[in-house]
Structure formats: C-alpha cells, structure tokens
Amino acid sequence: MPRLILSMDGLVLKEMVLEKERTTIGRKPHNDIQIDNLAISGDHAAIVTILNDAFLEDMNSTNGTYVNGQPVKKHVLQDNDVIELGKYRLKFIADSSAMASEQDEAMSFAQTTGAGDDIPATPEPQAAGSSSAPPVAALGMIQILSGTHAGRTLELSKSLTTLGKPGFQVAVITRRPHGYFITHVEGTVFPVVNGRSLDAQAHRLNDHDIIEIAGVKMEFFSQMVA
C-alpha cells in the first residue's frame, strides 16, 4: 500500500499509509494530514488513491504545491516523488511489490478537432508478466452510447480503467471482488451517473447505470463469466 513520509529540514516527522481513497492535506484540523504552519493553506492539497495509483491535486492553495521542484495543479505520483509544501516534504513511496504484479489499463477520450465528438484512444498494452484483477462473479462492461464510437463495448477486465479527457475530466473504474466502483480523479466537473452528479467518494456501479464523463455517455452492465 502506498505511503507518505513527512519531513522538514531533513528530519522525518511521521510516516503515513494512504489507506483512504481521498487523503486531504492542510492547516485546518479536519485534514487527514494536518500541518500547522502559516505557509500551508487551510485546505492545501488532496491525494486520491486507487489501488496502487495516487493522484495529487492542489486545492488552489496560496503558496502552491510542488513535486520534485516543479509547481503542479494535478499530478500522477510516481515512486519516490517528493511533494513540497513550504518547508515541508512528503515523500511518496509506492507499493513496488504490488505494482510489479499489476498493470492498469488506461482508456482516454480525446476530443476530435472540429468534429465535436469524443473518441477513445487505444488502451495501453499490458506488460509481460502482469496479471489481471482477482476474478469476480460477473465481468463488467461499458458500452459507449454517444460520439463517433457509439456502440463500441469495452471489457473492464483489469484492476483499474481510466476514463475521460486528461486536463478536463477524468474518472477511474476499479474492479474489486465485490463489484465495480467509479471514482472522480481530475477536473472541477464530477462524473454523472443516472443524471446525478457524484461526489468525491467511490460510487458502486449497478447494471444499466448510465455514466456521463467528458461529454460521452456510456452504459455499465455485467455478464457472467465461467
């Protein structure tokens, strides 16, 4: 499981395991990681953790959020990345053993120039030696309902599938032993399921749910597998 090591001026202050799907960082007491320093905004940043992936987002902080010396608004954290908040450092440590045994599938919808339709890019190939998610009773499927690829069906056979348009709106669907869940990752606009906007928490998908992400409508359904 990924974790963070908090330090200041080279002195390690604490180590935290990223157990929650959304971990908040800031000066206010309600944050999961509270840093009581005036250089830190009340609600400074948040980390969304899905399986072994972690997504960092700056929450419009006053002094900004940096990763490896570069200012970021949104960033996919990699092993040994250093998040800098004023004088404080948060080193991200990935679960390398789990990462070596899994390969996540990414599916993005890039907007066609001038056409106004969203099209899916080719999924990233699975690395040799990687494995799929643990089997569940039914295999989840997504059927695209709008855009130039309406009618196309995608199998949700991997542990994690990313949907959306990077830089605009991104969500992930995770495959777990007890079902499929959709979680918002990036963008001010949250995914819509059955006409209702989601919040920051993971939402379990049911058969024939209608999902709208980055202007593309799609239907989730499941089918039994041997």
Image (cartoon, helix red, strand yellow):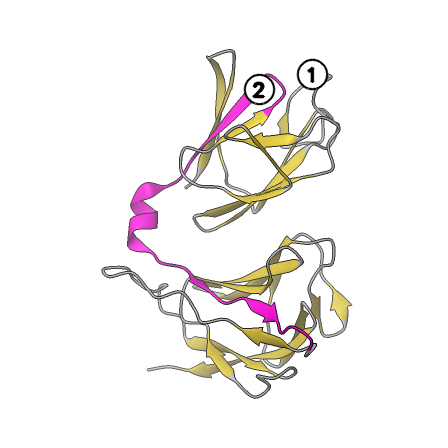
Position in image of residue 155 (x %, y %) = 45, 77
Q: Residue furthest front?
A: 114
Within-10-Å neighbours for mark 2: few <14, some 14–19, many 20+: many
Give the camera-side residue of 166 and 112. 112
Is residue 25 in view from this perspective?
yes
Position in image of residue 223 (x %, y %) = 46, 83
Say whether marks 2 and 1 touch (CB < 8 Å): yes
Question: Image quadrant for the N terminus?
Answer: top left
Separation of disc 2 and disc 1 at Cα?
A: 9 Å
The relative height of residue 167 versus residue 84 in the rendered view (above or below) is below
Residue picked out by circle 1: 37
Q: Earlier in the sequence, mark 2 or mark 1?
A: 1
Give the camera-side residue of 177 and 109. 109
Q: Residue at x 68, y 28 (%)?
A: 26
**Kind of residue at badge 1:** Asn
Kindly state the secondary structure of the residue where label 1 is placed: loop
Kindly state the secondary structure of the residue where label 2 is placed: strand
**Kind of residue at badge 2:** Tyr
Within-10-Å neighbours for mark 1: few <14, some 14–19, many 20+: some
Q: Which residues are magenta?
A: 85-114
Position in image of residue 90 (x %, y %) = 52, 27
The relative height of residue 104 versus residue 56 in the rendered view (above or below) is below
Q: Residue at x 73, y 32 (%)?
A: 61
The relative height of residue 167 versus residue 49 in the rendered view (above or below) is below
Residue picked out by circle 2: 88
Residue 72: quarter of image: top right
| Residue 88 among magenta residues | yes
Q: Which mark is residue 179?
A: none
